[in-house]
Amino acid sequence: MAMLSFNGRVQIAIERAQTLYPDAEFLEAQGRSSAGLIEHPAAIDQLRVLFRRDGGATLVVEETGYGTFDQPASVDAIVGGATIDWPIGMDLPDADRLKEQFGYTEPYSRVALRIPQGVTWANASYVFGGNPQCGDVLVDTVTGKVREAV
């Protein structure tokens, strides 16, 4: 069996949420590595996907095993941010390559796919972070721009 891509795993979570809650809008995918700091995106082995429903309720779908997800659960927290038009054209390994091509080669322990707040563009971006030695790095999934988070 082929290993699922990051976007493939997100797609499974989206289908799970929207099957039960057709009004669920995709907000963010949060990936983490259980191994700590990593240098390759395939080591992101934990995934949590957030949705907003009509009326502002927030849903979360947690990965229970690689590519296997629990049922969507409502959470008390109200998550802000813009919804992501899915599917997107860039997967995590592509974003990782771009970040490295621009000189950002430091290891990371988490990555989020979201529309960042406080930036000049409004595209979904991969946000690499979790390294206390350096700041987060953003990769725009539409333009391919790579920037440090401010």
Image: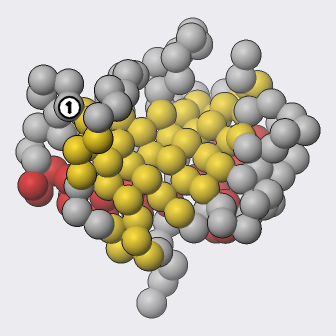
**Horizontal side of residue 36 vs 43, given as left or right:** right
The residue that appears at 73% across and 44% down in the rendered structure is: 130
How many numbered markers are drawn?
1
User: Coloured how?
Assistant: secondary structure
The residue that appears at 63% across and 37% down in the rendered structure is: 127
Q: Position of residue 149 (x, y in %)?
A: 71, 23
**Horizontal side of residue 127 vs 65, given as left or right:** right
Q: Position of residue 53 (x, y in %)?
A: 17, 33
Label 1 crowd (10 A; few <14 / some 14-19 / many >=20): some
Q: State the residue lying farthest toward the bottom.
A: 1
Q: State the residue lying farthest toward the front.
A: 76
Q: Secondary structure at mark 1?
A: loop
Looking at the image, residue 25 lies above or below residue 81: below
**Horizontal side of residue 62 vs 138, given as left or right:** left
Q: Is residue 138 visible?
A: yes
Looking at the image, residue 67 lies above or below residue 27: below
The residue that appears at 12% across and 28% down in the rendered structure is: 54
The residue that appears at 58% across and 13% down in the rendered structure is: 119
Q: Point out the image quarter for the C terminus.
A: top right
Give whichever of 101, 118 is nearer the camera: 118
Picture quarter containing residue 103? top right
Q: Position of residue 136 (x, y in %)?
A: 74, 33
Q: Point out the image quarter for the N terminus.
A: bottom left
Q: Position of residue 90 (x, y in %)?
A: 52, 47
Q: Which residue is mark 1?
A: 57
Q: Amino acid at mark 1?
A: Ala
Q: Is residue 11 visible?
A: no
